[in-house]
Image (cartoon, grey):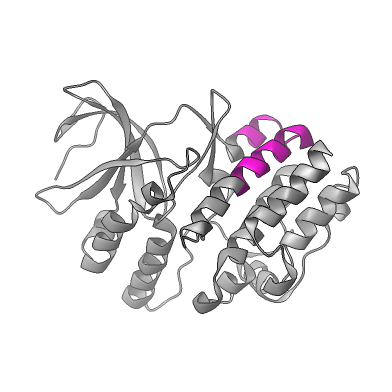
Amino acid sequence: MADWTPGSNVRKYRIDARLGEGATSVVYAATHVNNGLRVAIKVLHSELAEEQEIKTRFLREGYAANSIRHPGVARVLDDDTLEDGTVFLVMDLLDGESLKGRATRLGGVLPLQEMLPVADRLLDVVAAAHDQGIVHRDIKPDNVFLTRDGAIKVLDFGLARMKQNAEKFFLEATGAGVVLGTIDFMSPEQARGDQAAVDPRSDIWSVGATMFTMLSGKRVHSGKAMADYLFATATENPKSLAFHAPQLPAPIVQIVDRALYLDQNARWPNARAMQEAIRLAYYG
């Protein structure tokens, strides 16, 4: 097995630190031993790498981000497979913090003057992806990264669909349903397991849920256990953002509430339309 402890070498990269772990992978900071380039390495969990379909999709769909050709998407630079079957992607190493981390540092809520420019740029990336036929499926504060120079990067484009295959693998292997990742930003059609209905408006819902949580500090369907939360997401319109954050301007409340409609046809028709509404409300 490869040694991923800090200071060890894996192929042409020296491992510097373990950055975090998610449902499908572990991420490390590393440095190219020849040219000194600092990168992030995303390593697929070993039990998933044993499934050829999941491994192939991980490597192939990791590059989906590059096809979007938008500066707000973290690039995949390289990939490799080790002798023991371990597969990994080499990506841009970002300097900054996630949107969730930023909100946590500020006490759980982002000021409106911070959230609206982030939402504007997030929707620009989402719209560019949709133009290429790519639906993210996992927009959430953890996947929106704020760099120190003021830019945003949307993470895990192309990997969200792979997560569905990973969930299917666990379901078949264990005989029990397993939810991978957070459910707080999952659209109603995803909560119902209706993957055929997932489309760009599903990402619109997740952007709305991100704004709702960052501006109010509350979950879209607050105070529920996981099973009840999934049921509520799948079957109910949430309470208005104004219920939790009455101080917010009415136009902003209306934008977020529309994004979170249970009925896909009642939501914003596309990311550009929601983006324009935010710009009109913010800039006048």
Vertical placement of 190 versus 239: above or below? below
206 or 223, which lies in front? 206
The residue positioned 69% from the left and 37% from the top of the image is 117
Q: At 51% from the left edge and 61% from the top edge, which residue is drawn?
A: 137
Q: Is residue 35 left or right of residue 140?
A: left
Measured from the top left, where is residue 111 in percent x and y? 76, 34
Residue 212 percent across, percent down from the top left: 73, 51
What residue lies at 38% left-to-right and 31% top-to-bottom? 93
Residue 124 appearing in the image = yes
**Left or right, residue 144 beside residue 26:** right
How far from the left and from the top, in percent, is residue 11? 14, 35
Horizontal arrangement in the rendering, residue 12 relative to residue 200 (left or right): left
148, 11: nearer the viewer: 148
Q: Say which of 193 and 2 sits in front.
A: 193
- Residue 172, given in percent of the width and then of the height, sits at 34, 77
Point out the image quarter for the N terminus.
top left
Question: What secondary structure prevails in the magenta region?
Answer: helix
Magenta stretch? 102-123
Q: Quadrant of the C terminus?
A: top right
Would residue 117 be counted in the magenta stretch?
yes
Q: Residue furthest left?
A: 83
Q: Was residue 276 drawn as part of the magenta stretch in this picture?
A: no
